[in-house]
Image (tube, rainbow, N blue to C red):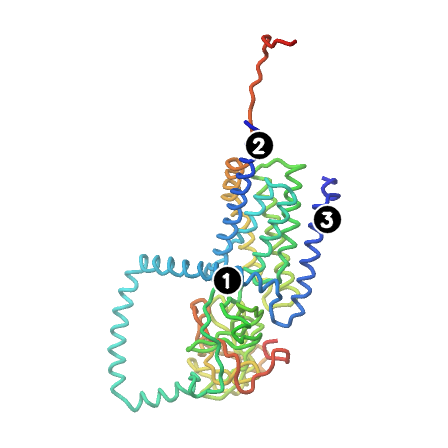
Amino acid sequence: MNIDLKRKKEKRNSVIRWCIYGLLLAVSYIYMTTAPLTLRTPLFVIPIVMCIAMYEEPFDSAVIGCAAGLLLDTAQGTLIGFSGIAMLWCCLGTSLLFHFFMRRHILNIIMLNAAAAVIQGVLHYFFFYAIWEYDKGGQIFLDRFLPVMIYTAIAVLPFFFLIRFLVKKFGVIVENYIEEKSDDIVRE
Amino acid sequence: MKDFFRTTKFKVLVAVMAVIVGIMIYSVTTGGYASDSSSVFGIIFEPFQRLSTNISNKVTSTLDMMFNAEKYYKENIELKEKLNEVYNDIIDYDQVTRENEQLRVLLGLKEEYNDYQFSPPCTVIARTTNDPYHSFTIDKGSDDGIAPYDPVITSSGLVGICYDVSRSTSKVRTLYSPKTAVGATIVRSKATGIIEGDYELTEEGFCRMNYISKTADLKVGDIIVTSGSETFPANQLLGTIEEFGMEDSGLSQYAVIKPAINPDDVSTVFVITSFNGQGGADEETEAE
């Protein structure tokens, strides 16, 4: 394939891919802020950005992680930037791990996503409930935070397959060449 | 991997983090008003939240109609029977007039409290995700005269208090939150106490009235209204007593209150932006 054409296609794929990422985040944010208050709603933005971090460059992953964290802050009513910083580091770490040390396997992302959910949940509980010594804080953690962490950890499964499909469909164009040995080449 | 930490991109990330930390520090010093960054987020997301709430409400009501048609049919029959009973009650005009007068006092209708200044009607545009105390966001902010610690009501009573007010949105802390301590009076016996949230009771849709005198006369069904303070105007309906008892210490009584308003069902509210006796946002308030 012509190199220019290939670059163009890759650029187009990249734009489509990132638009779909943005759409996924927007839809999950809307669901999180409109779900009934009695439900324990999974924090869908966490598995989405963790799966994205698995495939994208570390810098891009950190930026989208930070953006997702800020969304999480507005949805959860926490101090703006609180989850932003946490998710920036989680996504950066995940991306670096998958680029240098780990295979892109579902078990690995389940483990890392669960870790991110726990880090976010525990930090949220600690800074917004525990240190203010709310009555029945332990019960709030068990009744509210723990189920949300578990649901968030489980929610990675559909997003793993979806993001993997997106990356395959709209990722880097891989060209396979079949090289043939030929004695017919005339060298002058 | 070590190389990544030496790149310009990593330095950019560190700079971004420093900016966010700066915003966080600034945000906590704004005294109940949202920082500019929060306001920007509010402005960006408000239309989406409004749209999504409308879609969500439509889908919910359609599904509700589909799945609960039989239940509503039965309810309809029951309500018709109740309506007949009400028609019979209306015949006793004098009694109804008296009740009406009492309700006017209790519910604090606007004509009796002409010192109130209201915000325009506010629509609930988002619920705080997984908040144990059911706080939510409304679509009016400081541009509409709303300030932190302004009380939020509906025609049925007090809902809560505003906090984190940005230019176009405000967050509302409900009666369920332990941070929203409201001075309350029992209408029949004039006994006073403080209504506070309690996590276990919140899960069941109740809150708790504490510090009631141990000699106070309480009955199930007694109506509770606000006693009036710098934060909350007097005589706003809060709820009714569901059950009561003596505290373990034996020094006072408590009551479990069924709030007049369920925050989960609220879609439109009003904010009282001014009333006689209101204290400033910077002053010490009950809510703090």
**Within-10-Å neighbours for mark 2: few <14, some 14–19, many 20+:** few
State the residue in front, B136 or B206. B136
Checking the image for residue A78, the label placed there is none
**Within-10-Å neighbours for mark 3: few <14, some 14–19, many 20+:** few
Residue highlighted by disc 3: B11
User: Tag count in the figure?
Assistant: 3
**Looking at the picture, which amino acid does disc 2 mark?**
Asp
Q: CA distance from mark 3 to mark 2?
A: 32 Å
Q: Secondary structure at mark 1?
A: helix
**Looking at the picture, which amino acid does disc 3 mark?**
Lys
**Looking at the picture, which amino acid does disc 1 mark?**
Glu
- Asked if badge 1 and badge 2 are on a common chain, one would say no
Q: Are marks 3 and 1 in contact (CB under 8 Å)?
A: no
Checking the image for residue B46, the label placed there is 1
Residue highlighted by disc 2: A4
**Within-10-Å neighbours for mark 1: few <14, some 14–19, many 20+:** some
Q: Residue at x 62, y 45 (%)?
A: A60
Q: Chain of mark 2?
A: A
Q: Secondary structure at mark 2?
A: helix
Vertical placement of residue A28 versus B228, above or below: above
Q: Give the image quarter of residue B83.
A: bottom left
Q: Is residue B194 left or right of residue B100?
A: right
